[in-house]
Amino acid sequence: MPDSANDFNCLLNSDHIAIEGLEVAAVIGVFDWEKEIKQPLFIDLMMAWPNRVPAASGELTDALDYDRVSRAVTQWIQARPYGLIEEVAEMIAEQVCREFGVALLRVKVAKPTAIESARSVSVTITRRAGDSAS
Ligand SMILES: Nc1nc2c(c(=O)[nH]1)N=C([C@H](O)[C@@H](O)CO)CN2
């Protein structure tokens, strides 16, 4: 079984926090006309986190604050133009691990405006903290 499949099973079997369908207006795409407009991206995140700790303490500081993560992800995507949705997924994975101390996560980036005859297209990656983007 490839490592990413093992990691994903590990994520499913562990405590995690999820953010689903986070909509971000982005400059995204490889074609020139796409660099002049904003298109919506929808981000799903599944992030390993020991939820017993905040459950016991009742403290937001022990929890992975989904509000802060959502705002940070939006800000990172809107900070500059991106070409491939793969680049966006890798950037989110790296930054969430680094900035929020997440050890393992799954990131899905969907671009519903990409193909007229398709409801959406997407990429999904599973990464551990410290994984290189290559
Ligand atoms: N694997 C990918 N294929 C394509 C991407 C992408 O980001 N990843 N992007 C494009 C264009 O930007 C397209 O979305 C314009 O409609 C084409 N293929």
Image (spheres, rainbow, N blue to C red):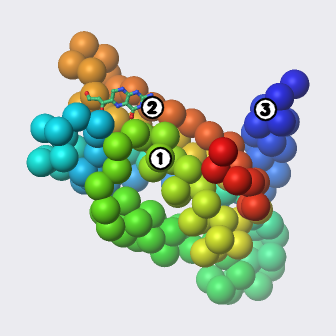
Left or right of 74? Residue 113 is: left
Q: How far across and down, in percent of the image, does residue 94 sit?
A: 61, 60
Q: Is mark 1 within 8 Å of ligand 1?
A: yes
Q: How far across and down, in percent of the image, does residue 11 sit?
A: 77, 46
Amino acid carrying label 3: it is: Ala
User: Does residue 102 sit above or below 127 in this rendering?
Assistant: below
> Of 39 and 79, which appears nearest the observer?
79
What whole-number distance in Å separates the C-alpha atoms at marks 2 and 1?
12 Å
> Of 49 and 4, which appears nearest the observer?
4
Q: Which mark is residue 87?
A: 1
- Quarter of the image that includes the N terminus: top right
User: Which callout, 3 or 1, points at the residue further toward the start of the chain?
Assistant: 3
Amino acid carrying label 2: it is: Ser
Residue name at image x 65 percent, y 71 percent = 98
- Of tags 3 and 1, the one toward the viewer is 1
Residue name at image x 75 percent, y 74 percent = 55
- Of tags 2 and 1, the one toward the viewer is 1
Q: Quadrant of residue 112?
A: top left
Helix or strand or loop: what does disc 2 sit on? strand
Would you name the residue on which mark 2 appears? Answer: 122
Instruction: Decide: few, some or many residues near mark 1? Use Cα within 10 Å; few <14, some 14-19, many ≥20.
Output: some
